[in-house]
Image (spheres, coloured by chain):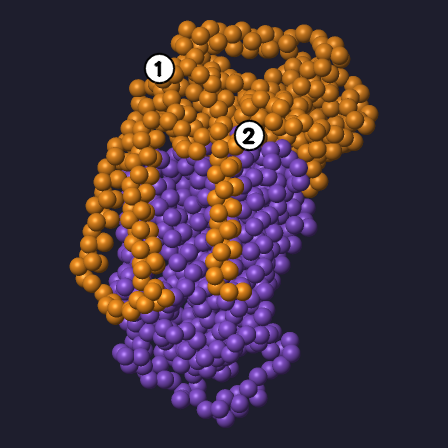
Chain colours: A orange, B purple
Amino acid sequence: MSVDKLKQTVLGVVAVSLFLASGAVFAGLADMPLNLTQGVTETSQRVYDLHMIILYIVTVIGILVFGVMCWSIFHHRKSKGAVAAQFHHSTAAEIAWTIIPIIILVAMAIPATKTLIFMEQTGDAEMTLKVTGYQWKWKYDYLDEGVTVWSALDQASNEARQMDSGIDPNTVENYLLDVDNPIVLPVNTKIRILTTAADVIHAWWVPALGWKRDAIPGFINDNWTNIKEPGVYRGQCAELCGKDHGFMPIVVHAVSKEEYAAWIEEQKAAALAAADGANREWTKDELLAKGKDVYAANCVSCHQANGNGVEGLFPPLNGSAIVNGSAADMIGLVLNGKNLMPAFKDQLNDADLAAVMTHERNSWDNTAKDIIQPADVKAAR
Amino acid sequence: MSYGAVHDDEHHDHKPTGIGRWLFSTNHKDIGTMYLVFALTMFFIGGAMAMVIRLELFQPGMQYVDPQFFNSMTTVHALVMIFGAVMPAGVGLANWMIPMMVGAPDMAMPRMNNMSFWILPFAFTLLLSTFFMQGGAPAGGWTMYPPLVLQLGDGLPFLIFAVHFLGLSSIMGAINIIATVFNMRAPGMTFMRLPLFVWTWIITAFLLIAAMPVLAGGVTMLLTDRFFGTAFFDAAGGGDPVMFQHVFWFFGHPEVYILVLPSFGIISQIIPTFSRKPLFGYASMVYATASIAFLSFFVWAHHMFTVGMPLAGELFFMYATMAIAVPTGVKVFNWTATMWKGSMTFETPMLFSIGVLFMFTLGGFTGLMMGITPVDFQYHDTYFIVAHFHYVLVPGIVFGIVAGVYYWLPKWTGVMYDETLGKWHFWTSTISVNVLFFPMHFLGLAGMPRRIPDYNTQFTDWNQIVSVGGIAFGLSQLILVWVVIKCARGQGEKATDQVWEGAHGLEFTLPSPPPFHSFTTPPEVTEATAHS
């Protein structure tokens, strides 16, 4: 193959690729931003500005350096009759291209340092939210109010994301970015956000707030935010935390202070009602109905919808000796956990626990078929 | 000429034959070849795992693998590529070239050389066998962060011992390289006359000896945490999971330079050859390489800015990270100045070297962006990072290794490779590698976390482009296999001793292919004949 023919072919490939790439840009990519978000906090705005400054600086340096390389590549080639010079050092040039980058770097470091100091000012917060990462959901404690919210992937996404679900993710709104219980935060309030975890390391990240921070078991990190605009802000766990790392989103509803206060009251009332559930006798139908939902939200990702678990990782519940054995043993295991199985005593209330165990004892090929009352769970705590 | 034909033949008579030649080899060329063939094999195994990743990410929803297996793919892909492909390829090139470049007959410790290679297949048998175990292959990321990694099933001790073996192999290889260069240089081959490839490898070897034991210590603590009741990384027992990250990245950041410095050395050989001009700023290249290596021990925590460090720590690691840009910039400027006013031709090794120059620099720019701590709080653990380190590792390092293979292949085999195929390999690789990795910057900035098996539908289009680029890049590498097989079979034009018009250095005074024992009589090196 002649060199000319090769060049033509290569140019052709380049042209087609560029055409395809640009076609893709204009066709269906409009819904994804190509740049970092400016977000809705002063922090996120400052981070965005810093990102853009540095992007501009490296772009200018890139144009200069790549420009010199390209100039050299096109002009200093043997085929154009270029004769090689034989110089091999220049102290002046070498000093210059050591000193100039240092000056540019110092110029970058100054705004970066200011922003970092600003981000680390966690004092003077008006309220505190404690975020705890679990495999694979989030627990939010409103420490000043005594309100707790558990937040996991919403049902629609969870069904669609199962293998061979037959559900097109494009038909699910906010696929993988929606939760069952979103958290609510007030705008124009300095909120201290503590991150920690119960099992492995997670990272709490809502891009619109301008930062992410690891949630580390046994340690507490403190951060802060002050949301300027009401809205719904979505994020995800950013630190690999096991099988369902990709399936533990975060949804923050930022609302006015009044709406926030009303929401807190609602949460308190709901918590009282749920606690009340443990004090009465439940029917089997009630328990089975509730248990199915609790199973779907808390158990299905490990033990699977068919109750068969995942071989080598998560044991089956279908036909399990414990599920079909004494109620007391099962209650003890679910409350206190074992190996990879988390302790659910702090995660679920008595009614939820009773319901889900009743559901399991009556599902698949299990033969126990009895019921566990919330009072049984309460007694075992 | 210092080698005689008769002398040469005498040694060929002793060359073992059959499988024994390879199993018991103490010859730097045969061991170098085995390293390179092993690296290429692992490159395709790791590449196949990348293809599984890109297949699953081609569209939203889970289609082909379950999330646990997906995590195994990302984890083992990285381990195989880093420890199985890039590092052995670098050692393979060092084995082949360093004795020839310093004017020695072989490596200083030929039997240890054999052992450091033959550990590798066993180490990777341990690692890859975990796919068939209870609990599957490692799935907690190649960084092996506890507590997650401790949730692995029966595979955990196999992972840890594989890492131990890989460390042993690397340390033995490093000791051998240092001993060879320090003791077996030809008369007149002073340190400041060493070819840059040899310099970068000495520095890499010292990094290996300093960094690998740290990793070995870290993973041993994982082992005792899991099996012997210690709590190094468990807060409930007074430990700290973040301590593992500090230990890991104290190894991990020098490791980045262990991977990249040999590539820098290779293009420092190639760019002067095809510019027909001496390397610009030889001394500053050596000092810059040493500075980069030294600084690499003070920047580890920039991999973990989001763990929550005190402000002073975050500032220190930000400034130290930015400082690395200075010696790295010096190297890029020196390469550019080497091409400036040269008389360039663009054979395949030069094309790949220019590819390194452009695309490594691009990866360097994003590296600088991520070194800015407050902005890294957004970039961290997103596809922006994936884009950055793949730009540095693939067009930055793999391209450098490939450039070295094309550059020295005629010397090794005695025949010129097929230049047309080489150019096809370069252009298809360069176009596809950018289609593969450039859009990842957009995905990361738009908010796609790394290491997820499924994503929100807004990310679909760019992921599809990335997957197409990935498959094209994978297929392009088959051209390299074809080129190498043709040369190994002796199909091609006979190569001269010098191979390339502008080539200098002792390796180009030997015949192509070189004799079994490179220099049996040491050559005399003078200022005029030295590569620099």
Q: Nearer the viewer, residue B322 or B156?
A: B322
Which element carries disc 2, helix, strand or loop?
A: loop
Which residue is denoted by mark 2 in the rendering? B456
Label ID, residue A53: none
Circle 1 chain: A
Q: Looking at the picture, how far across and down is residue B471, in whole percent? A: 58, 49
Quarter of the image with the N terminus of chain B in it:
bottom left
Q: CA distance from mark 1 to mark 2?
A: 29 Å
Q: Nearer the viewer, residue A322 or B162?
A: B162
- Measuring 53% from the left and 68% from the top, which residue is drawn there? B418
Label ID, residue A188: 1
Q: Residue A345 sits in which quadrant?
A: top right
Q: Is residue B294 visible?
A: no
Quarter of the image with the C terminus of chain B in it:
bottom left
- Residue B329 falls left or right of residue A5: left
Mark nearest the camera among 1 and 2 is: 2
Which element carries disc 1, helix, strand or loop?
A: loop
Query: Image height check: is B179 above or below A231?
Result: below
Q: Nearer the viewer, residue A257 or B514?
A: B514
Q: Looking at the picture, how far across and down is residue A194, in whole percent? A: 42, 26
Q: What is the three-letter code of the residue carrying label 2?
A: Asn
Q: Is residue A85 visible?
A: yes
- Measuring 36% from the left and 66% from the top, which residue is drawn there? A79
